[in-house]
Amino acid sequence: MTEYRVTFLPDGKSIEVEEQTTIAEAAQKAGVYINNLCGGEGVCGECRVKVVKGEAEPHENASAFFSQQELDAGFVLACQTPVHSDLEVEIPPESRLEEEQIITAGEQWPTPEPGEEAPEVSLAPFKPLVRKIYLELPRPTLEDNITDIERVARELRRKIGWHSYDITLHCLQNLSDNLREHDWKITATVVKDKGGYRIQQVEPLDTSHRNFGVAVDVGTTTVVAQLVDLRTGRVSGIEGAHNMQAQYGEDVISRMIYACGKGGLHPLHKAIVENINSLIEKLVKASSISREDINAIVAAGNTTMSHFLLGLTPCAIRLEPYVPTADVYPQILASEIGIQINPLGILETIPSVASYVGGDIVAGIAACGIADHPKVQGLIDIGTNGEIAIGNNEWLVCCSASAGPAFEGGGTRCGMRATRGAIEKVQVKNGEVVYSTIGNAAPRGICGSGLIDCIYELVKNKIIASDGKFNRDRKDSRLRVQDEIPEYVIAPAEETETGQPIVITESDIDNLIKSKGAVFAAIKSLVEYIGLTFDQLDTFYVAGGFGNYLNIPKAIGIGLLPDIPHEKIKFIGNSSLTGARMALSSEAAFEKCLAVAKSTTNVELSNYQPFMDEFVAALFLPHTDHRLFPSVKY
Amino acid sequence: MTEYRVTFLPDGKSIEVEEQTTIAEAAQKAGVYINNLCGGEGVCGECRVKVVKGEAEPHENASAFFSQQELDAGFVLACQTPVHSDLEVEIPPESRLEEEQIITAGEQWPTPEPGEEAPEVSLAPFKPLVRKIYLELPRPTLEDNITDIERVARELRRKIGWHSYDITLHCLQNLSDNLREHDWKITATVVKDKGGYRIQQVEPLDTSHRNFGVAVDVGTTTVVAQLVDLRTGRVSGIEGAHNMQAQYGEDVISRMIYACGKGGLHPLHKAIVENINSLIEKLVKASSISREDINAIVAAGNTTMSHFLLGLTPCAIRLEPYVPTADVYPQILASEIGIQINPLGILETIPSVASYVGGDIVAGIAACGIADHPKVQGLIDIGTNGEIAIGNNEWLVCCSASAGPAFEGGGTRCGMRATRGAIEKVQVKNGEVVYSTIGNAAPRGICGSGLIDCIYELVKNKIIASDGKFNRDRKDSRLRVQDEIPEYVIAPAEETETGQPIVITESDIDNLIKSKGAVFAAIKSLVEYIGLTFDQLDTFYVAGGFGNYLNIPKAIGIGLLPDIPHEKIKFIGNSSLTGARMALSSEAAFEKCLAVAKSTTNVELSNYQPFMDEFVAALFLPHTDHRLFPSVKY
Ligand code: FES
Ligand code: FES
């Protein structure tokens, strides 16, 4: 019998085989692996190869597996194709052993909306956790009578990658009728889960445009939700609201006390679910879509918020030895906790590192790409806690310090969150105050970034001293005493929306000094803990609910951020939300979150003496040790 | 610095390392893999090794990972143990890469109850799909403050194997309180799913004795359920009932026609669910357990029954090209289809091979171990279909032929299923009939095995001829004509429970000849299809709802089974039920079912001419070609 040589690419192994041997058998002899799920029956399509030199005819049923273009390019099923000339056969990645597919063609990380920082994208290709894939299936014949669901899976493999797909009972129900009544045209909803891919639902005809997701930042003070079109990656809306849990306590600790006392967990769980439902309601209305079009939610929050969201008691988090129920959370149906989207829509919760370093910071790390770069970078997320992460693509450490609500607009007389009417920039010139508000509306209060500007300007203009006390001798009509409390008027009553003046009191300043002191002390302790100095940080990302804006030099000026070259500090807004959106839109980003949560080392500051010392030393504007802030000149 | 030699067993690789290097680092240098889930933090416990020579001290927290016995035996965590002498270190299987654990100690396949055939067990160690494991957890400390669920998983790894465990939201809810209120004593319910293991539930205190499963054979005629104690493997009860779907049609085809016509799927789905619920009700009452103690059901049925059970339309199964919705079914909660057991209890459905070779035959193949042995063996499951499988540990082929309900006690005047009061053995001697009934009760009818005996005896005694017609000339008081139909009286009216005589009519005989003809023709066609002859079969298992008994020589005598040495034919009763019970009780058996379903080749007889020819030739007692039955001498 004639023998022919078959060479396998890319690894170049070759073998002589008798005529009529199949390519699959030749590969086996040559010790080259080709997928072979159906055992060479020609029904699974796993053994696709490309004949690049020599002649090979596609087998009878080949059009069920390949597009015309692929057939023209020489694609055949290895198990169905006999050798009758010398061949060079290329084994494409999908036919090799279990290599993860990366889809790039036509799918790119979306252009961010105006006002939104572009995330690092190179390692997070667009591939949402839930995809809807429109399929036109070949009709079954006596020669090709695999089951309906296997026919769906086979077409999915051709279209989006050669995985094995889990199935749900739901996707089987009515499948037979749906296929036959709608001309074999269906849309499959494919969900990524930790273990792999699952066909969640099969709908008749093309519904692939009805696929939205919601990224949620569950903050202690505010909850923000972003609607994402999962077909394109485009952000179609954003809404925010106060965390309705505030009625049970301003900060995390008081809410835990409420939940673990007679109040119980339920009201706090319910509050956050209602928060999210009402944000979704708004998003859906504004975009004229239906709730059923939302198939996925990714939520990022601190560990306690994640527990509240999922209905898990956070009681052991609060007490030594600080133990959460879980730090990696299962994927669930959003409906299981009463969130009203598609009944088969999923909810993923970004994993936490530890009791006080939650999914919000993990999402933030993913959003700014710290874990992807060789250079050491830092991230600080300033909310009611200041959470800090430092690291690179080899290691990550993090810590957390209680900052109080000042930076989110809480705990100060006229504080408010960064929404319309909040004073966000302040300048004092010759005794005159120039401010601007979000949305250029009449001022209603002052948000975190306005507060930082304000304190900086007051010190700079010697209205307050380095210890935070008003310089009472100073003649300034804005500096006054009301009910024995000295205060400084930022916006007089006649300018404000409420008719009440917007002021800063000495106790506001005191609060802010404690907040910024805790944050700075935490940064410094962590940097020194890992044996670095500030100047070894390549980039320092600052995130937080300040609004759209943070004046870096002024934040350094009050001693909140370390005095490093300003261009190394980047304000990135709500990185928790950005990270949640990335995880929603990119499997790789979601997996990065899991990897970050697993590999980050938490440094517990609560009993760490160097932190205590740093904290006390930082209760000054900018700092008791002025050498730490050489660039700050008042 | 001093260097020491570390040798790793079992593969014997060795390396010199500096003092204080950890065993894990040494292994890495030596190119020996040790699990390392937590990255060497000493918290995951994945890197357990046994120091068999040399000195190594367990680290501080070692008692969280090892029993005293293990510590005494030299177990340490590789990542936490510095080298300070020459060492020989054994890497136990659980610390090696992803090798599947086989648990043997203390867990053995149960002794079968009296009257039950022992299944092949060597390849199906007892390890139920759902296990309840009682755990006493070490309390968390500041040094050991992993999350609650990770603490549960860590202890599970120690106790039942080193897997990663999926979690459900349910197992997290109340976990924190349950642990702390019950002294860290809990019972975890662990479920095997296709992908791996899942912690399904965590209950306070020790509930491990409350773990039962139910194996169900969903037959077209009868439904049989067996209660299994999943802690011991013991069978605690068995109940059977007529398939309540019979009201919509006697056989599978007429039920499909009903379901696919105006009747709809729902009544058939509901009927079988109610069937199972009422069997469970009986089992639970008889064993004085609670429905909530049942955590798993494994159901085996033909492809159509499996579809009905899961609420999937079987309509495309009936028509060319015979396409089921699915042949591998997802694991679901039994409650999803209304089966009343523990709300978190699972239901697995044994996968099918094809439209007319279902999970019942797959379970049967697993039960008799055909796929595990090098010698060629056969299995025939005789119900309303005769399904035949032939093969060995390298290949399997199967086919199916419609046999009609005769062998299950249907379609004949006095037929009944094999329950109390059924005539199961018949002998005719000198014109006298000797019979025995199931339970030695007064006869109520005649079951499949009784019918076979009967026909054989009637031919042997020349009461009927080889063509199945009564020898009307014969003088025999039992041979009579009623309403113009000749019949033979097996039990006269005065002996029966009903007061009606139990008789065999000519049309009963005719039915039986057609049934046995179809079965024999199918066996012969399949054997010849694969190029074998009968005498190449090492063993031929016969299963079916005949009751506890089938007389092999008589079954050969009427031409139902091939004429091979009698000792090669083994009657194994309800192998579908046995296989379902094995799958329930042994992960390996369940996986075997999956493998069998995937790898078995179905031979479609419906258009296969040799089968038609064989069928016609077999419509005789024993056969038109008497040379095929040399041992049969009437
Ligand atoms: S191996 Fe399945 S089609 Fe070739
Ligand atoms: S690697 Fe995790 S305990 Fe050693």
Image: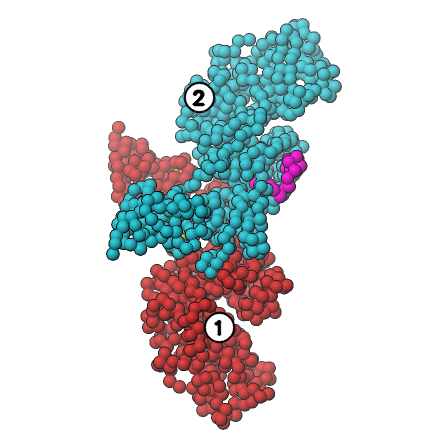
Chain colours: A red, B cyan
Residue B396, image x, y percentages? 44, 29
Is residue A403 positioned above or below B195 on the image? below
Q: Is residue A271 above or below residue B317?
A: below
How far apart are labels 1 and 2 at the CA level? 79 Å
Residue drawn 43% across and 30% down?
Answer: B372
Q: Nearer the viewer, mark 1 or mark 2?
A: 1
Do the residues bearing badges 1 and 2 touch, measured as CB atoms within 8 Å? no
* Whether labels 1 and 2 share one chain: no
- Would you name the residue on which mark 1 appears? A403
Instruction: Please tell me which residue lies in front, B49 or A447.
Output: B49
Q: Is residue A394 magenta?
A: no
- Is residue B288 part of the magenta span, yes or no? yes
| Residue underneath mark 2 | B538
Count every numbered label the image shows and give the total.
Answer: 2
Q: Which residues are magenta?
A: B278-298
| Residue lying at 54% horizontally and 35% vertically, measured from the top left | B233
Residue A372 in view: no
Q: Amino acid at mark 2?
A: Asp
Q: Residue A345: which quarter of the image?
A: bottom right
Q: Position of residue A354 (x, y in %)?
A: 47, 61
Ligand 1 visible in quadrant: top left
Mark 2: secondary structure: loop
Mark 1 belongs to chain: A
- The crowding category of the residue bearing disc 2, from other C-alpha atoms within 10 Å (few below 14, some 14 to 19, many at least 20), is some
